[in-house]
Amino acid sequence: MNSFVEKGWGEILAHNDLDSFEALWNLEADWFEPPNYRRGGWSGVSRITLSLPEGGSESLFLKRQENHMRKTWRHPVSREPTFRSEARNLRLLNSRGIAAPHMVYYGERKTPEGWQVILATRELKGYLPMDELIEKWHAEGWGKHRVQRQRVIPQVAEVLRKLHHLRLVHNAMHAKHMFVQEQTGAACLIDMEKMRSRLTRRQAMLRDLETFNRRTAHISRTDRLRFLLHYMHKARLDDDVKACWRILVDRAEHKNAGRRGR
């Protein structure tokens, strides 16, 4: 995929004089996150607000990178821009109805200095990273947020279940990569550049759930089991749930033991 503009967004970009790669690349905008300088190049994110032709506005996250490359199975030697694989994955998830940022623009070009790439997605309004929400639950007391936890956890589990049903693995399933809407509990995956397909749903499941289980500090055993029950569509702790739980616990203990032994 060399370029992409979501239906209806060509008019919005033109309304803001941003209907070309050059205009978006040269747009002066504050960094939402400090640029990441590695892999021989840089990558950064800005938050911009565009006016709509019919009135009102819409906010986007504008991601730009130059020579930010990595090896992939498609390009094991020459490498490819990291945003290219993220855009490919976002377009797939958007088309399958799996909660992820909605991509509205993608473009790339090769220059004498190397690859320049732009990826723009609609802002996730009212969402925050799940790790921040967990810290809030921990700081203010688990009991105070019991209703919210019971609303959030099943929806997070459902997003991952749908992803793995397609034999797709996120591959960096930290709590900071799951965004949650506090009021409704709606969940949404972000940071999709490492997503890959696996031969089986089970492979995808164990890879992501092991990481997610290990990387969510403070969550109680009860909430972890509640998550697993919803993920597996089970009403009680049967043999399948217990077997999966044991695998996740054993993997976490093995990883933690390896770190302590270094």
Image (cartoon, rainbow, N blue to C red):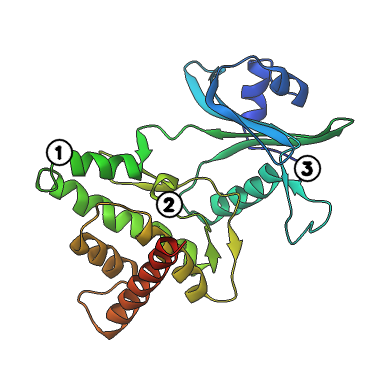
The kind of residue tagged 2 is His
Residue 7 picture location, percent across and down: 63, 37
Circle 1: is it few (<14), some (14-19), or many (20+) Cα within 10 Å? few
What percent of the width, then of the height, locates residue 166?
53, 67
Q: State how far apart marks 3 and 2 are (Cα).
A: 29 Å
How many angstroms separate mark 2 from mark 1 (CA)? 22 Å
- Rendered image: mark on residue 174: 2
Q: In this view, does 106 lie above or below 168?
A: above
Q: Nearer the viewer, mark 3 or mark 2?
A: 2
Q: Looking at the rendering, which quadrant does residue 179 occupy?
A: top left
Camera-side residue of 34 and 121: 34
Q: Residue furthest left?
A: 143
Query: SS of the residue at dot 1?
Result: helix
Classify mark 3: helix, strand or loop: loop
Question: Where is residue 234, by image quadrant?
Answer: bottom left
Which one is nearer the viewer's eye here, 72 or 168? 72
Say which residue label 3 marks: 2
Residue visible at 45% across and 47% down? 177
Q: Distance between the residues labelled 3 and 1?
A: 47 Å
Residue 210 versus residue 3 in the image, above or below:
below
Judge by depth and name the residue closer to the eye, 190 or 105: 190
Q: What residue type is disc 3 on?
A: Asn
**Which label's residue is closer to the chain start, 3 or 1?**
3
* Mark 2: few/some/many CA within 10 Å (<14, 14-19, 20+): some
Q: What residue type is labelled 1?
A: Glu
Mark 3 closeness class: few <14, some 14–19, many ≥20 residues within 10 Å? few
Vertical comparison of 110 with 175: above or below = above
- Total labels: the figure holds 3
59, 44: nearer the viewer:
44
